Image (cartoon, rainbow, N blue to C red):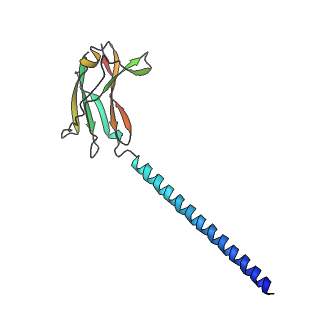
Amino acid sequence: MNKNIIKKAIIAAILITVFSLLITKWLDYKKQKDYELKRQDMIQTLNKPSKDTGLVTLKIKKDTVTKTGLTLVITDYNEPDYGWGPGYEVLQLVNNEQWIPVTSKIPMVFNEIAYVLDENSQWEYEIDWTNFYGELEPGKYKIKKTIYDCGNIDLYSEEFEIK
C-alpha cells in the first residue's frame, strides 16, 4: 500500500509539474501575442498620415502659363500645414491617355527651403523651368509635387496647356 501512495504522489507531482509548465507557456504565449498586437497598433498609428491631402490644392494662377514657366498656387488648410519646398516635376499627357514625366536636360536638384504660407494658407510659387526643360512643346501638362507624411505622397496640379 505504501508503494501505491508513493506512485500516486509521483504521478500527481508529474501532473502538477506538466500542468504548471503548460500554464506558464500559455501565459508567455499570450503575453507575446498581446505585445505583438500592441506593437502592430503602434506601427499602424505611426504610419498613418498626420494630415489630410484633401485639404490641399495645387492650382495654376490664371494667365501665368508660358512655354518657360507658370505660377502655381498651393493652398493647404491643414493645421499645421505640410512643409512646402521648391521641388517639382512636369508631367505631359501623351496620346490623350498617359501622364509621363518630361525629360529634364540636367539633374533636377533643389535647395530644401521651407516656404511659409500666407494668411490665406497659400503660397504662390513662380516656377521657371527653363534650366530643366527649356521651352515646353505644345501639349497638356501637370505639375507634380511630392510631400512626405509617413511616406512620399504625390500631389498633382490641375491640367494646363501650352499652345
Figure quadrant of the N terminus: bottom right
- Indicate the quadrant containing the C terminus: top left, top right, bottom left or bottom right: top left
Is 141 on the left or on the right of 70, as rendered? right
Residue 84, by quadrant, is top left
Relative image position of residue 147 (x, y in whole percent): 33, 36
Q: Toward the viewer: 81 or 17?
A: 17
What residue is at 61 percent from the left and 69 percent from the top? 23
Residue at 30% in and 18% down: 106
Nearer to the camera, 101 or 161: 101
* Residue 63: quarter of image: top left
Number of numbered discs: 0
Residue 13 vs residue 135, the one in the foreground: 13
Quadrant hosting residue 65: top left
Q: Position of residue 99 (x, y in %)?
A: 41, 22
Q: Is residue 98 above or below residue 82?
A: above
Q: Residue at x 18, y 38 (%)?
A: 118
* Residue appearing at x 35%, y 39% in the figure: 53
Residue 43 x %, y % = 43, 50
